[in-house]
Amino acid sequence: MDFDLTSEQKAFQQSAEQFARDVVEPRAALIDESGAFPHDVIHAAASLGLCGVTIAAERGGAGRDYLSYTLAIEAIARASATVAVSLVVTNSLVAELVAHGSSSAWHERWLRKLASGEALGAFALSESGAGTDAANQQTSAIRDGDTYRIRGKKIWVTNAEAAAVAIVFASTVPGGRRDGITVFLLPLDTPGVTRVSRDDSLGVRGLGCMDLDLDVRLAADHVLGPVNGGFPLAMWALQGGRVAIAAQALGIGRAALDQAIAHAKAREQFGRPIASFEAIQWMIADTATELDAARMLMWKAATIKDRDGDGLVESSMAKLAASEAAHKAADRAMQVLASAGYRRGSVAERLFRDSRAAEIYQGTSEAQRMIIAKRLGDSRI
């Protein structure tokens, strides 16, 4: 395996890093403090092709490979986990799914807008009883002539505050679970869509998360993919999303490592920098090692995604390793900074809160272990 990035990948990474330094980082603290969706930052990201990174140029995207996409997400997450996750959702869970599962007519109507950032996308899969058990969809879609009546409630819909369109999963066969779920492309200005504010979140604040109360009629041509074939599409989208969330987690972890190193060099106790003490050195060494190991898993999963291979296990491994490495990195950074980090408004405090979410959304760490173990049981044990 070649670990050297191409000149194009390096250039795209550097562009994302500069954008993160110049635009995202100066806004990160205010986004977290206010909890307000960063419309201006996402608009600026769109101008750099960051809303349709892997979408072909002829469809309005940047036409980059998946590894380039993860490099960009990691760079942005190092400045703001919130901005990174918003971009992951509209890229991996919406634009890529529209490109993969819809007709050319929908490519012209929505894909170009999504890839260019003219429209932002949301992904409405979760319900109160459908989290890890994603097949337990209670939102129903009943065919009535040339339309479907869709009724139900979706929760924790990232980007919902600002999105123009949502990917909505609904049951079209009562009790059919994974064999009876259909995907709909739902414009959020459709009559019968009500956006409901959610309780404030601990971290990754400013994501525009809302619940969606749905009682809509939608033309049958808004079905994305085959009727009753929506569950495999959800899993396909989440597989790519998990690679990108691994990148987001690594960005958080790297930012935490940066905080720990800078403080350890500057802080003196007993007449010398605390970086000279083994206890601090070992925390920094462990963090760097775990983050680099997780990055290799992420790069492997991204490479498989580029080749259209079966990367189910690799994407789960990447997300599991990266999210848990980021959590440890943020925890150790808090320990190194001590009282300098354990206060509201510090960067270390924000990273500590943000890191925890990566172990939950787009599949908990427990769900990733279930996926990995099942595949190993099927083929190796």
Image (cartoon, grey):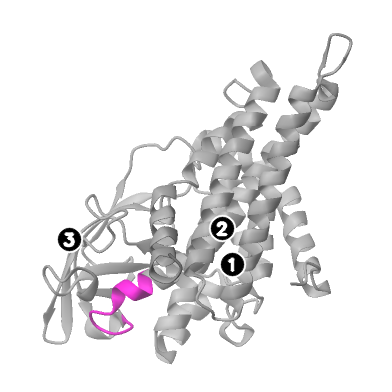
Residue 223 picture location, percent across and down: 28, 81
| Location of residue 216 (image quadrant) | bottom left
Magenta stretch containing residue 231, yes or no?
A: yes
Residue at which label 2 appears: 318
Between circles 3 and 2, the one closer to the viewer is: 2
Residue 225 picture location, percent across and down: 33, 83
Q: Is residue 149 visible?
A: yes
Q: Secondary structure at mark 1?
A: helix
Query: Which residue is pictured at 37% across the width and 75% down the height?
Result: 233
Amino acid at dot 3 = Gln
Residue 257 picture location, percent across and down: 71, 38
Between discs 2 and 1, the one toward the N terminus: 1
The outermost residue toward the right is 271
Between circles 1 and 3, the one closer to the viewer is: 1
Residue at which label 1 appears: 301
Query: Which residue is pictured at 44% across the width and 75% down the height?
Result: 97
Q: Which residues are magenta?
A: 224-234
Q: Secondary structure at mark 3?
A: loop
Residue at which label 3 appears: 138
Amino acid at dot 2 = Ala
| Location of residue 202 (image quadrant) | top left
